[in-house]
Image (cartoon, rainbow, N blue to C red):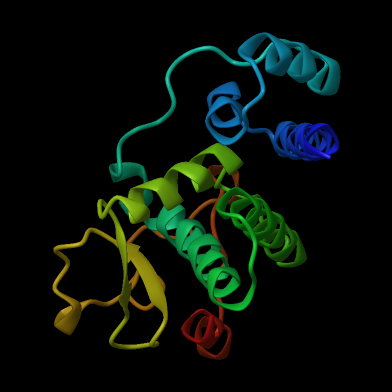
Amino acid sequence: MARSKSILTEARQIDRAVTLINLGARLQVLESETDLSYERLLRLYKEVAGKSPSKGQLPFSTDWFMTWQPNIHASLFLNIHEYLNKTSELEEIDTVIKAYQLYMEQTASQGLEPMLSVTRAWRLVKFVDNGMLTMTKCNKCGGHYVTHPHEIAKHFVCGLCNPPARAGKGRQAGALQMPSAANRQGLAHA
């Protein structure tokens, strides 16, 4: 019985690793979220992705999530993640995977290029879990956005309600089309 359970667990971990690879996760994420050996993950990565994994360290700064467009994308992802955390009984990494898949569907349905990689999404959740980032409610639209934990919530206004002066200029720079006030309310209900 114990042997069949370990086989089932290993199969589940391989499925999880394949899903993460297909979503573009870095090898370090796979190492952190499975019990599979480095050598096995490396072979699996090469087989699934058809190439060797990227080298180098994972992004560690919280600053990327604070810039205008990345903040909007990170906030969308994190709202989906928090909703799934409250309404489902998934393991944490499976919640990240499902939330990321839903984030990708949402950006595609709006005709937008996703700015958040699954590795950054995973790192974002780690930052929130460790108290390095949090969610703060916008005083204008009521949506919840990724902020530093010391943000003064009483006066917080999000980047959609108060975009920077050059926001939305130039399609080649990955410009974001501003949603209507009704669409911004969607972030408030997530």
At which x and y percent is residue 72?
46, 62
The foreground one among 125 and 76 is: 125
Q: Is residue 145 above or below residue 186?
A: above
Q: Is residue 164 at all visible to an observer of this figure?
A: no
59 lies left or right of 17: left
Q: Is residue 24 above or below residue 41?
A: below
Task: Pick the quarter of the image with the N terminus.
Answer: top right
Counting the numbered discs, the total is 0
Q: Quadrant of residue 103?
A: bottom right
Residue displayed at 56% across by 83% down: 186
Q: Quadrant of residue 18?
A: top right
Q: Quadrant of residue 105?
A: bottom right
At which x and y percent is residue 89?
63, 68
Task: Pick the quarter of the image with the C terminus.
Answer: bottom right
The residue sitting at the front extreme is: 1
The foreground one among 6 and 52 is: 6
154 lies left or right of 187: left
Q: Is residue 55 at all visible to an observer of this figure?
A: yes
At which x and y percent is residue 175?
54, 54
Residue displayed at 51% across by 44% down: 122
At which x and y percent is residue 139?
28, 87
Residue displayed at 20% across by 62% down: 149
The foreground one among 55 and 70 is: 55
Q: Is residue 60 above or below residue 84?
A: above
